[in-house]
């Protein structure tokens, strides 16, 4: 079975202040763009549409804090303005200016995993 092309948990991670703070098992990203119709007097249909602002919502599943983040006392509930990095074989996607919108914890005693975090990102950059 060839798994080339599929990211692993070390390829998906959260970064704050230039440090990797957590690895992520999987993600689901939804990008939306608002648009506006331009209407002209006397026309029954819009004559054009223009691009509006973009929003990025990302749901992360099984987030593990790194040893460094744990020793630094990371608190996922208080972090702001962090990045999500997704490294794929042919490109790298970085969601910047992230804020958490929803955190779901299901765990066992002593476990350093968060089951789900929903993020809202200010920007998305894709590089090769």
Image (tube, rainbow, N blue to C red):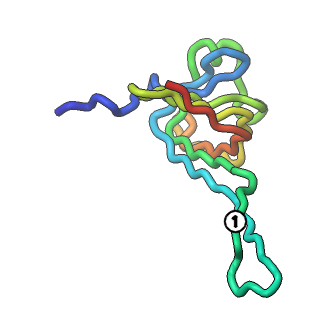
Q: Position of residue 95 (x, y in %)?
A: 63, 35
- Position above or below: 87 against 123: above
Residue 33, percent from left and from top: 66, 56
Q: Which residue: 68% across, 15% down?
A: 18
Residue 90 position by quadrant: top left
Q: Residues within 10 Å of mark 1 (few under 14, many from 20)?
A: few
122, 65: nearer the viewer: 122
Say how many tags the image has: 1
Say if 40 sits above or below 106 in the image. Answer: below
**Residue ranking furthest to the left:** 1
Classify mark 1: helix, strand or loop: strand
In the image, 117 versus 94, the foreground residue is 94
Residue at 54% across, 27% down? 127
- Residue reaching furthest to the right: 41
Which residue is depicted at the point 65% across and 15% down? 19
Name the image quarter holding residue 32. bottom right
| Residue 54 at least partly seen | yes
Q: Nearer the viewer, residue 66 or 42?
A: 42
24 shown above or below 35: above
Residue 81 in the image: x percent, y percent? 76, 31
Q: Above or below — where is 12 with respect to 106?
A: above
Left or right of 11? Residue 41 is: right
Q: Is residue 81 left or right of residue 30?
A: right
Residue 110 appearing in the image: no
Q: Position of residue 71 (x, y in %)?
A: 66, 12
**Quadrant of the image containing the N terminus:** top left
Out of 29 and 69, give the one closest to the viewer: 29
Q: Residue at x 20, y 31 (%)?
A: 2
Residue with the mark numbered 1: 49
């Amino acid at each position: 079975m060839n798994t080339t092309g599929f990211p692993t948990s070390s390829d998906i991670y959260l970064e704050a202040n230039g440090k990797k703070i957590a690895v992520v098992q999987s993600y689901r990203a939804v990008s939306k763009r608002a648009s506006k119709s331009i209407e002209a007097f006397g026309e029954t249909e819009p004559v054009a549409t223009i691009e509006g602002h973009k929003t990025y919502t990302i749901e992360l599943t099984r987030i593990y804090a790194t040893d460094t983040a744990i020793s630094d006392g990371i608190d996922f509930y208080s972090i702001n303005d962090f990045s999500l990095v997704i490294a794929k074989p042919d490109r790298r996607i970085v969601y910047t200016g992230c804020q958490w919108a929803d955190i779901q914890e299901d765990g066992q005693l002593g476990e350093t995993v968060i089951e789900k975090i929903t993020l809202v990102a200010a920007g998305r950059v894709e590089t090769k």
